[in-house]
Image (cartoon, grey):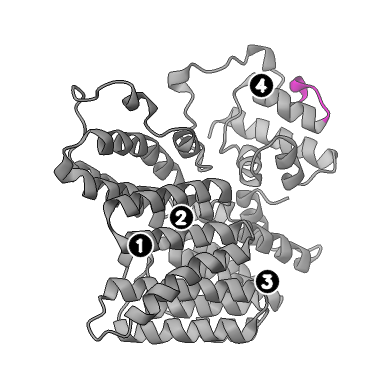
Amino acid sequence: MSPAEFVTGQRIKELRRSAGMSQAELATAVDRSESWVSQVERGVQPVERLSILQVLADALGVAVRDIRPDADAVEPPAPETSVDTESNDLDGLRVALTGHPALESLFTSESHRQLPSIEDFRRDVATAWEYAHASSFAALSDHLATLLPSIEVAVRHAPAREQAELHALRARTYQVAAASFTRQDQADAAWVAADRALQAAELAGEPLEVVASLFRMSHAFMRQRQMDQAEQAAQSAVRVLEPRSTRPACPPEELSLLGAMNLVLAVVNAREGNRAQTRAYIDRAEAIAARLGEDRNDFDTEFGPTNVKIHSVSTAVELGDAGMALEVAATVDAQGLSAERQARFLLDVARAHAQRRHVGDATAALLSAEALAPEQIHDHRLARETVRELIQVSGPRVPATLRSLADRCGVS
């Protein structure tokens, strides 16, 4: 972050407040995400194009020079220097997802072009999931913006013997894109990525990859608040997998997906206030996790006994049962899970403390989550809402640590 970017961000924040606008309202006015506005105000997301400065100025009812006095000197950056390397808004990945993924390859032969090997693609897909589990969205966006077009070309020109595996790798690539878009509140892009993952998984002849893609689609629907569709996607998988799970030799990967889908259904019902159904799905997931007997990461779902407990905490918070959430949370040791899962668990602990107006404990949980996955906490809708709630509860004496966290999250 340069000093100039920080100053510009501060001016935008001051002008927004003077206009009586929230970050969400400004985001709507400029057709961007609230996360983007937050990053601009913190100086994380540079605003270098005159066209964007003008849109911001119009929305705020001011002149461009009120935002940036040196606006006359601002020039659109050259294409090769226009990448915002510090953005974690997944903008580069959104662009890579737009339109046909490999249109040029339909018109020209790529036989002369050196494509990555199947081993390279395996490694690159694994790296993408590592970024996702660490909530390193800026690095993930750059990585997938290159990987997605490359694998789309490869699958159209690779030898027949490699086609099935390339389709499977393509499915996993779109799954990681869908998961990350969902976490960054970009549900429209998440749905597109999940739908492409479904198609690729079927072409690969991998039914379990199809189910894994449905898992990502369910989360996209939940983020869109389309609970009926999220439930339908999850239930369609459960109806097929549940009868198969009674087999003595049911593969653990299949059990993991069944368990993960039951957790999706638990969350859906919790958000709709259905306590009995929520508990029933948690119990089913718990029984499946007990059969597995260990925490696993099949299809990058991180399903296992610990994740079931984490969802017990999350659904209790959704239902307003802060006491139960904190009681279960005290029994959870999440250190074996990814940074993303640990941070999300701590966020739910913070939300439970906030429901009980425990400002100090809630702030401590948020700071621990931030230390694990700063990008996730700074831009997660629930984290920002929790920070706002804690500031309101604190009244005129907001603790310095909470105020500092609010500044890092871009919370007004």
Callout 4 secondary element: helix
- Count of marks overlaid on the render: 4
For label 1, the residue is 300
Sooner in the amino-acid sequence: mark 1 or mark 2? 2
Disc 1 residue type (three-letter): Asp
SS category of the residue bearing label 2: helix
Q: Indicate the position of residue 157 as horizontal and vertical percent values.
A: 23, 33
Marks 2 and 4 sit apart, C-alpha to C-alpha, by 31 Å
Does residue 23 appear to the left or right of 313 in the view shown?
right
Measured from the top left, where is residue 340 in percent x and y?
44, 61
Please provide percent x and percent y for residue 396.
81, 62
* Badge number at residue 51: 4
**Residue 390 or 297: which is nearer the viewer?**
297
Query: According to the image, label 2 marks what residue?
Result: 179
Residue 293 shows up from this direction:
no
Residue 145 vs residue 328, the one in the foreground: 145
* Amino acid on which the number 3 mark rests in the picture: Val
Considering depth in this image, is 74 or 290 the residue closer to the camera? 290
Tag 4: amino acid: Ser
Lower sequence index among marks 3 and 4: 4
In the rendered image of this protein, does residue 353 appear above or below residue 166?
below
Q: Amino acid at mark 2?
A: Ala
Cα–Cα gap, marks 3 and 2: 31 Å
The first of marks 2 and 4 along the sequence is 4
Q: Which residues are magenta?
A: 61-66
The answer to whether residue 300 is visible is yes
